[in-house]
Image (spheres, rainbow, N blue to C red):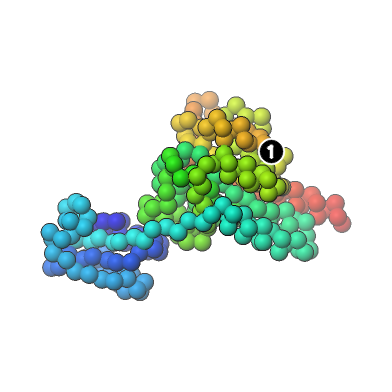
Amino acid sequence: MVGRNAVLEALRVGVPSSQLYIANRIEHDARTREIVKLAGMQGLNLLEADRLEMDRIAHSRNHQGIILKVQPYQYHTLAELADRADKKSHAMEEADSQSARINARPLFIALDGVTDPQNLGAVIRSAAAFGANGVILPERRSASVNAAAWKVSAGAAAHLPVARVVNLTKAIEAMKERGYYVVGLDGGGNAIVGESGFESDPLVVVLGSEGKGLSRLVREACDSIAGIPISSEVESLNASVAAGISLYAVSRARSKAGEKADNSAK
């Protein structure tokens, strides 16, 4: 990662990094002083290099005398994510209210063909905000959790696990074998998002790319296809916007189901 603004933002949100390169004889400003301070607080190695060496490391001359070496993101396996979610859900089985138990049911979001890392970062942020247990990505034709995604996630990538799978369709089938239901978000569906009937169950919500939507095999693997009612003047929503709406709809449906269950038990 290069450039004063990009490196400063990355350090502010805690993008995992190992080394900070600074050009010798650099003209310091408020940004570089904060960068050095944050790098020191985070225990990074600070190295000085001449202009030619900086150009070589960055593969560019547009580094503004600052280069941050970012560590590779540590992905989880699908089984690790599911086991962790099941353990958390089982811990709530003795809760005093049905509402607490319903809201603790596992929830994942899977992305099919979303290639923009900034979209991925925004999805991770929304997933964390609405209590999802993790994000599932295919290894091919998908964005990865790089520095850009991490930055947009506003730090959520630090505590929300992400799994990469070889085949998304097979991953969906594996989750269904564990008792999950799968709702795909796409146009022309048989339900409205938040009203599929599976919201109170262990759930995987699958989003496709903004242009192509869900792939055929992924769509066929879903238990239900749900859509977001939007104006006919707009063809589709950005993937991260659709994710936020969908996760809110699931959260709201679970809250309503929990309240209803609690009232019935009185």
Residue 103: percent from left, percent from top:
69, 54
Q: Secondary structure at mark 1?
A: loop
- Say if 70 sits above or below 139 in the image: below
Picture quadrant of residue 2: bottom left
Does residue 228 appear in the picture of this structure? no
Amino acid at dot 1: Glu
Instruction: Determine whether, in the image, residue 253 is placed left or right of residue 66.
Output: right
Does residue 214 appear in the picture of this structure? yes
Is the C terminus in the top left, top right, bottom left or bottom right quadrant? Answer: bottom right
Residue 243: percent from left, percent from top:
54, 43
Instruction: Determine whether, in the image, residue 143 is placed left or right of residue 104.
Output: left
Residue occupying the point 35% across, 64% down:
17
Residue 135: percent from left, percent from top:
53, 50
- Say if 152 sits above or below 194 in the image: below
* Mark 1 crowd level (few <14, some 14–19, many ≥20, 10 Å Cα): some
- Say if 190 sits above or below 44 in the image: above
Circle 1 residue = 195
Residue occupying the point 60% across, 42% down:
172
Instruction: Determine whether, in the image, residue 122 is placed left or right of residue 78.
Output: left
In front of the other: 172 or 155: 172
Total residue callouts = 1
